[in-house]
Image (tube, rainbow, N blue to C red):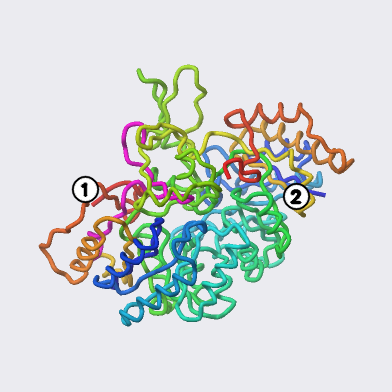
Amino acid sequence: MIELVCPAGNFPALKEAVNNGANAVYIGFKDDTNARHFAGLNFNEKNLPKAIDYAHQRGTKVFVAINTYPQPSGWSRWKKAVDLAARLGVDALIVADIGVLDYAAQSWPELSRHLSVQGSATSYESLNYYQKNFGIKRAVLPRVLSVAQVAQLAEKSPVELEVFGFGSLCIMAEGRCHLSSYVTGESPNTCGACSPAKSVRWEQTSQGLESRLNNVLIDRYEDNENAGYPTLCKGRFSIGENTFHVLEEPTSLNTIAILPELDNIGIKAIKIEGRQRSPAYTQQVTRVWRQAIDQYYADPEHYIPQENWSAALNKVSEGSQTTLGAYSRPWQ
Amino acid sequence: MKLSLGPLLYFWSFDDIQVFYQSMLEQPVDIIYLGETVCSKRRSLNFEQWMELARNLKQQAPDTEIVLSTLSLIEAESELKTLRRYCNNGEFSVEANDMAAVHLLSEQHVPFSTGPTINIYNTRTLSLLHGQGLRRWVMPVELSRNTLKEILQELKASDLADKLETEIFSYGHMPLALSARCFTARAHNLPKDQCDLKCLEYPDGLQVKSQEEQSLFTLNGIQTMSGQRNDLLDALPEMQSMGVDIVRLSPQAMQMPEVIQAYHNALKGKEGITAGYARDENCNGYWYGEPGMYQSM
């Protein structure tokens, strides 16, 4: 059965994921060793053991994301994160950096290693590299691939595959995007933050509500428009005379409609994005996806996504609009 | 320090590519990287023709090192097929821009180099890849001189400093991101599959500005580049003293001979010569540990 992997930015969210049917939860530490390094989020040495106990007692696995790229001055922090997660008995590490993968494989060979989406492996030859050198058990695929490409890849993949099923849509190949550091100095790779909150400024002006990132104007909203978080790739910019969403309109990914396809091509796990979101988000999304997966396996031939699932998911999605993202490629 | 001409990141016509590289033979560059690194739909030159160009340049300038540079984002089986031809070419060394290429090259036990889209952020990664055949690396564009200093010190301590060449992306629009989507096609309201090869119309990329006319990004098909050109001319003495081996200049349609000349003069320690290319709008923030778009001193 396809495994449901849900986000937990804190203990209440972890409880929601566990209680609503997640097969695994993924978490991070309170520092830049993970790609959701946000204020007030994540776990520390003190509350992680309790969280692991809570999940394990109820049959839910715990994965720890240590999926940013350490530079020499920070290396000891990443090493410490790997050691701590291993000692506390988590079920897998989610890692992107080659050096960290190597350290984990050498120091804790028994502990499962998953290649993070930030590792940006988009072909089976790339997966072969990580499998051969670091014995990864699973890889999370970047959101740039179409279903047909995922299927091709799955056919020859040396490891289990996990794909994103729901949440914010990254349109760039993850782990290979520096837009954020170009404008703010901080990026997912270096700091675990994209378009960081501390660089955001909102201002009501005579031309409308403006969002800025390190002083760069990202968007300007008229009174009747919904304002979204100023993620760089979702801004409205100008090319010549035209002002539009040059890279991407704010939408969310939702693959609940293609669950049977994902199962048929041999996908092992579905990942829900959103460790930065509220416990209510985790609860809602976990519950709907649990229902969908259970219903699918109860009668695979007659699986039809229910309307109330979409309604529930749309309520918590960014831009209140969901798409199949690169999986269907309407822009292809 | 040597001067290198990085792979052409934009989409130019067959003739423009030939004319450009022929003219580059008159320039003081030590290394030339050739090949399509951005989009597999760009076929002004196919693999055989890149090889032919490589041989041609090598024949005319035997002292110039020619390296083949591979595609940065591999999505389809057909792209893997081409990648294998690059990696198995048997004549020229290869710059890997994706881990699939690193895998293919390391399996053959041939020496290779890596471009800026391979994530090498620390010494453990670097020394592990060295063990697999890495002989030269281009530092990811977002890393700073301080990080480089630390890495080079650690390399020295582990006796690897002389076995690995360090190359710094020093001039040109920086490759910042890769996507499955084509933003140039999007700007023309075209789907990717019917893009009409619009990139041909933008030999230096398509400028994106904020609604306040601030230069922000440069669209280059599936690649998003920096709005401003990185320019580390003033940092050359520092690079030299740190032990950087190669300075990479990224091909641009305009003023490339002037850029190369200015860097060459600086490397030769010639002072008092004003650089003959436009510098006012350039950036260098990443090198100094600042946002990449900044122009710091």
Closer to the camera, B85 or A106?
Answer: B85
What chain letter is assigned to the residue under label 1? B
Would residue B149 be visible to someone looking at this image?
A: no
Say if the magenta span includes residue B226: yes
**Amino acid type, mark 2:** Lys
- Which residue is found at the position 17% from the left and 58% from the top? B276
| Residue carrying label 1 | B280
Q: In the rendered view, would you say B190 is above or below B106? A: above
| Residue lying furthest right | A298
Residue A280: give x, y in percent of width and height.
68, 30
Q: Magenta span has B121?
A: no
Residue annotated with mark 2: A61
Q: Which sits in the foreground, B83 or A276?
A: B83
Output the chain of dot 2.
A
Is A63 left, or right, of A169 in this rendering? right
Looking at the picture, how far across and down is residue B57, in whole percent? Answer: 35, 76
Q: Is residue A147 among the parts visible in the rendering?
A: yes
Residue located at (58% from left, 45% from top): A332
Q: Is residue A85 above or below residue B137?
A: above
Amino acid at pointer 1 = Asp
Q: Position of residue B280 (x, y in %)?
A: 21, 48
Element under disc 2:
strand
Badge 1 density bin: few <14, some 14–19, many ≥20, Cα 10 Å: few
- Magenta region: B210-237
For the residue pair A126 and A214, the one nearer the viewer reads as A126
Q: Residue at 31% of width from left, 65% of height from top?
A: B19
The N terminus of chain B is located in which quarter? bottom left
